[in-house]
Amino acid sequence: MNPVRVSEVAPADPAVLPLIEAHNTHSRGASPATSNHTLDAADMAAEPGLRMWLATRDGDPIGCGAMKPPGDGTAEVKSVHVLEAGRGSGAGRAIMAAIIDAARAAGHTGLYLETGPEALPAYDAARALYERVGFGYCGPFVGYGPDPNSAFMYRDL
C-alpha cells in the first residue's frame, strides 16, 4: 500500500463531500440529536476561518478533518472521520498531524475538540486517537455547555 497523503481542501470539494456525509451519518446514529455538534458541508463553507483536510491513499479519499478558530487564540478540531476502508492506515493520525501543524503555524495556543464520551462506545477509536496525539480531557469550551453525551478535550500547542 502507498502512504496516506493529506492535503488541504475546501469543504465544498467534491472529493470530501461523501466523507463529511459519512461523518454526519455516524454522528447522527451514535449521539442523541441534542448532543450532535457536527456540521454539514454548507455549514462548514459558511464558517469563518474553517479549514479542511482530505486524506487519500492511492488517490482514493479515506478520511477528513477540519479546524475552526473560535476567536480566542485557540482552535477547535471538527469532523475528523476515517472511512472503514481506511482505518488502520494511519489516516487519522496524519489528519491530526496536519491540523496540529496548521494550528501552530497560524499562531493558535491550543486545540479543543468535542467527541462522544465513554458511555458512547462508537467514539472509542476517536478518543484513543486524540489521546495518542496529546489531547487530555477538560471541561466545556467556547460554544459548548455541560453535556453527559460529550467528552471535551484539549492540548497545548
Image: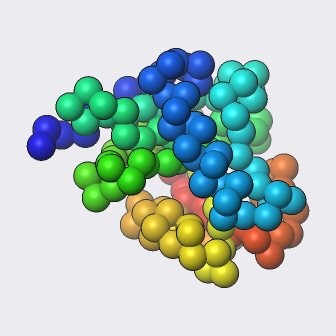
Q: Answer left or right for 137 relative to 127.
A: right
Q: Is residue 69 above or below residue 23?
A: above
Residue at 63%, 49% (x, y): give it: 25
Residue 97 visible: no
Choose between 101 and 15: the one closer to the eye. Answer: 15
Question: Percent position (x, y) of residue 90?
Answer: 28, 52
Name the residue furthest bottom: 119
Q: Quadrant of the N terminus?
A: top left
Q: Is residue 85 above or below residue 6?
A: below
Question: Percent position (x, y) of residue 10?
Answer: 55, 19
Picture quadrant where residue 147 is located: bottom right
Residue 153 visible: yes
Residue at 65%, 46% (x, y): give it: 24
Q: Answer left or right for 128 relative to 22.
A: left
Choose between 134 and 40: the one closer to the eye. Answer: 40
Q: Answer left or right for 151 relative to 2.
A: right
Question: Percent position (x, y) of residue 70?
Answer: 75, 39
